[in-house]
Amino acid sequence: MNPEYPGIPDDAFIRGDVPMTKAEVRVLALTKARIKERDIVVDVGAGTGSISIEAALLASQGKVFAIEKETAGIELIKANAARFLTTNVETIHGSALEKLGNLPMADVIFVGGSGGHIRKILEAANQILKPDGRLVVMAVTVETLQEALDVMQSLDGYQVDAAGIQITRLRRVGSKNMFQALNPVYIVACTRRESSDREVSHI
């Protein structure tokens, strides 16, 4: 199974109890990331690997580092990578704060799960993001959104945009159709300018 388009249906992935970024949110996040064929991508809090897999398909000659602290998540990422024939996904089991500093410079960084450490994760991500790199944060709480905006807007050399997404899906109920709302998600999309400073601001 190797689709040639973003927005793979949710039920195409092997799923467990680990959170997964839904297809509609994935499409927007991937669009904001502007992944190129040879890009190095980091997915923080990779969950089931839905973002990692789609990123790997886009960066077919690059590499994706999927960081996940839960063992169940690591197993799901590996299973989904095999399912979609993506050989360029490397799973990294552990805390993003411990692992980010050991990774190569990245073209794209996704931040999904942060475990309450969004500020420190973004500061660490800032250290490995290339000039013209893209950093995309997906937040499900207002507090994470606010802290992500505070951090990224305080760092020199970034263009920062944000949007809130509310997805409502059609569901068949007997002979009727009804809409079912998914949890809202906030996306903070940041692009590093070519001449940006490598130092982290003290905030």
Image: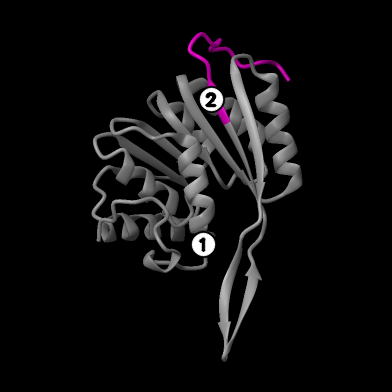
Q: Is residue 200 magenta?
A: yes
Q: Is residue 11 left or right of residue 45?
A: left
Q: Does residue 203 appear in this view?
A: yes
Q: Residue at x 31, y 38 (%)?
A: 59
Q: Tell me the magenta residue range.
A: 190-203
What distance separates the C-alpha of mark 1 from that of mark 2?
29 Å
Q: Does residue 21 appear in this view?
A: no
Establish if 135 lies above or below 23: above
Q: Magenta stretch mostly in which secondary structure?
A: loop
- The amino acid on which the numbered mark 2 sits, given as a three-letter code, is Thr
Specify which label sits upstream in the sequence, 1 or 2: 1
Quadrant that contains the C terminus: top right
- Label disc, if present, on residue 191 of the rendered structure: 2
Q: Is residue 77 left or right of residue 169?
A: left
Looking at the picture, how far across and down is residue 96, in whole percent?
52, 38
Establish if 175 lies above or below 50: below
Q: Quadrant of residue 89?
A: top left
User: How crowded is the residue under tag 2: few (<14 C-alpha within 10 Å), some, or many (20+)?
Assistant: many
Looking at the picture, how far across and down is residue 66, in whole percent?
41, 44
Q: Is residue 107 left or right of residue 123?
A: left
Looking at the picture, how far across and down is residue 9, in whole percent?
42, 63
Residue beneath disc 1: 18
Quadrant that contains the N terminus: bottom left
User: How crowded is the residue under tag 1: few (<14 C-alpha within 10 Å), some, or many (20+)?
Assistant: some
Establish if 53 lies above or below 101: below
Tag 1's secondary structure?
A: loop
- The amino acid on which the numbered mark 1 sits, given as a three-letter code, is Val
Q: Residue at x 51, y 34 (%)?
A: 98
Tag 2's secondary structure?
A: strand
Mark toward the viewer: 1 or 2: 2
